[in-house]
């Protein structure tokens, strides 16, 4: 009986997760994902940074992730987005519902609406990645946005250097390419840094390094970080950055997205509630502690 008290909730939770995914597959929402194991990687923070009132490059640090990341192998397709629009959960974006092309002309708000809809459809928690998570998944496809310009009282020097670098990058045109056209990175994640930039959940910020840690910040969540051939900052309701709304940098050709999956969220909450059920029949399962742990993400 002691074994059943501790093992059964986890077994049932895992089975419930599997059933959710099977049901999602039967409804046509099966999604190809890849799990990236924990590793250390170099990351430069997003946002604008200053030191003594002068614009400077953002700090760069080596970050070690302790948990794996499960992310969509490819961007959300036009057909997948259309299903959300047909259900009335997403705004139509005017694209043909093709399975072979990524969904474009979508805003941050559209992407988060899709994530909510997909979470309800599958019973699994989906969300946009943070900029740090996107860089982790991108690996060698992530482009460092540090500029070879010394700190100066003249901000136009950095603006010009950024424009020249981004304008000299590869030009793939604006027409979206078929899924897989830009190949896969070393982890098997496809179409990174092509001609579709991807929304992240990270807010734009301006930070002062005068204290050394960048703790003095002005955060604007009306503007989000988008990643692709270069990092850019786009107002959250914009669908076509080339027509305006790009807060910094060369406007992205297209705006799309991919999501990350929080497997632990569903499994932990199921386990906690099953633990509560078990506690009502047997001793030894601290349902209150398990529930608090599950909702805080501690499982």
Image: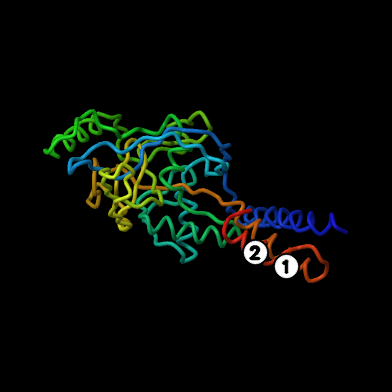
1 and 2 marks in contact (CB < 8 Å) = yes
Above or below for 251 versus 217:
above
Question: As displayed, is residue 74 above or below residue 21?
Answer: above
Q: Going 29% across and 51% down the picture, which residue do you hit?
A: 216
Report helix, strand or loop for mark 1.
helix
Q: Is residue 136 above or below residue 28?
A: above
Q: If the image is split into quadrants, where does the N terminus sit?
A: bottom right
Left or right relative to 19: residue 161: left
Q: How many callouts does the rendering have?
A: 2
Side of 215 where 285 appears, left or right: right
Q: Position of residue 111 (x, y in %)?
A: 42, 55
Query: Residue 116: x and y, percent?
Result: 50, 61
Query: Looking at the image, which residue is at 30% across and 58% down?
Result: 222
Q: Which mark is residue 276?
A: 1
Which residue is at the front of the view, 60 or 24?
60
Name the quadrant containing residue 176: top left
Kindly identify which numbered label has been placed on residue 291.
2
- As helix, strand or loop, the secondary structure at mark 2 comes to helix
Q: Callout 1 environment at 10 Å: few (<14), some (14 to 19), or many (20+)? A: many
Q: How far from the left and from the top, in percent, is residue 109? A: 38, 59
Distance, label 1 to label 2, CA atoms, is 8 Å
In the rendered image, the residue lying farthest to the right is: 1
Observer-nearest residue: 240 or 54?
54
Left or right of 30, for residue 165: left
Residue closest to the far bottom: 280
């Amino acid at each position: 009986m002691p074994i059943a008290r501790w093992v059964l909730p986890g077994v049932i939770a895992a089975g419930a997760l599997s059933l959710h995914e099977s049901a999602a597959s039967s409804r046509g929402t099966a999604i190809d994902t890849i799990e990236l194991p924990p590793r250390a990687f170099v990351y430069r923070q997003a946002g604008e940074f200053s030191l003594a009132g002068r614009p400077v490059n953002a700090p760069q640090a080596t970050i070690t992730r302790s948990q794996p990341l499960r992310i969509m192998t490819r961007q959300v397709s036009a057909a997948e987005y259309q299903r959300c629009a047909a259900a009335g959960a997403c705004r139509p974006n005017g694209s043909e519902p093709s399975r072979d092309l990524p969904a474009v002309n979508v805003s941050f708000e559209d992407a988060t609406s899709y994530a909510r809809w997909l979470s309800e459809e599958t019973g699994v928690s989906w969300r946009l990645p943070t900029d740090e998570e996107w860089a982790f998944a991108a690996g060698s496809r992530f482009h460092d946005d540090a500029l070879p310009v010394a700190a100066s009282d003249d901000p136009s020097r950095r603006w010009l250097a950024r424009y020249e670098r981004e304008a000299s990058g590869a030009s793939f045109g604006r027409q979206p390419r078929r899924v897989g056209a830009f190949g896969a990175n070393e982890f098997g994640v496809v179409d990174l840094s092509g001609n579709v930039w991807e929304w992240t959940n990270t807010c734009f910020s301006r930070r002062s390094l005068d204290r050394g840690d960048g703790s003095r910040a002005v955060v604007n969540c009306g503007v989000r970080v988008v990643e692709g051939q270069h990092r850019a900052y786009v107002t959250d309701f914009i669908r076509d950055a080339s027509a305006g709304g790009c807060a910094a940098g060369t406007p992205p050709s297209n705006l799309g997205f991919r999501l990350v999956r929080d497997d632990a969220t569903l499994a932990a909450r199921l386990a906690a509630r099953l633990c509560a059920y078990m506690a009502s029949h047997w001793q030894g399962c601290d349902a209150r502690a398990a529930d608090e742990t599950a909702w805080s993400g501690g499982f």
